[in-house]
Amino acid sequence: MSTQAIAQLRQRQVWHIAQEIKNASKHCVCVGNSLATDLVTIEKIPGDVNSDGEVDLSDAIMVTYCSLHEVPSNFNEAVADMNGDGEIDLSDAIIIIYKSLGVK
C-alpha cells in the first residue's frame, strides 16, 4: 500500500472515530489532530460555562452576564442551561451557585 493510500485511510479512520465520539454522548467533544492516536475526549461538565474544569461562582457570574445578553467570549452555551428550559437566565445562575456550594 502506498504512503498516500495509508494517509487517506488514516484520515478516514480519524473522521470515523471523531464521528463515533461525537455521537456517543452529547456531553463529550472530540479534540485532536490528524492521527487517531492523538484523539481525546473532554467531558462537558454541566454548569462549567468557562470550561476550566470546575463549577464555581465564576461560572454563575458568566451566566448572569449572558442572561443580560452580554455573552462573554469564552462562554460555553452547551452546558449553561441547567434547568433544561431552553433559555439561559438567572435561574441557571442560581442552580450553578448551589452546585458550586455542593447543595443539591
Image (cartoon, grey):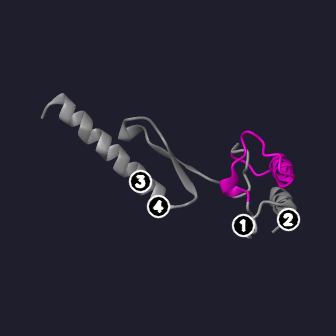
Extreme left residue here? 1
Task: Name the quarter where the N terminus is drawn.
Answer: top left
Residue 91's tag is 2
Which of label 1 and label 3 is nearer to you? 1
- Mark 3 crowdedness (10 Å alpha carbons): few <14, some 14-19, many ≥20: few
Task: Name the quarter where the C terminus is drawn.
Answer: bottom right
Q: Which residue is located at x 82 percent, y 47 percent? A: 62
- Amino acid type of the residue that numbered disc 3 sits on in the rendered structure: Gln
Of callouts 2 and 3, the N-terminal one: 3
| Distance from the alpha carbon under mark 2 to that under mark 4 | 29 Å
Range drawn in magenta: 53-80
* Mark 4 lies on residue: 24
* Mark 3 lies on residue: 19
Q: Quick check: is 78 in the magenta stretch? A: yes
Of callouts 3 and 4, the N-terminal one: 3
Residue 86's tag is 1
**Front-most of 84 and 48?**
84
Please tell me in which quadrant of the rendered image residue 75 appears: top right
Which of label 1 and label 4 is nearer to you? 1
Of callouts 2 and 4, the N-terminal one: 4
| Left or right of 23 in this view: 102 | right
- Mark 4 and mark 2 in contact (Cβ < 8 Å)? no
Secondary structure under tag 4 reads: helix
Secondary structure under tag 1 reads: loop
Q: Which residue is located at x 45 percent, y 54 percent? A: 21
Which of label 1 and label 2 is nearer to you? 1
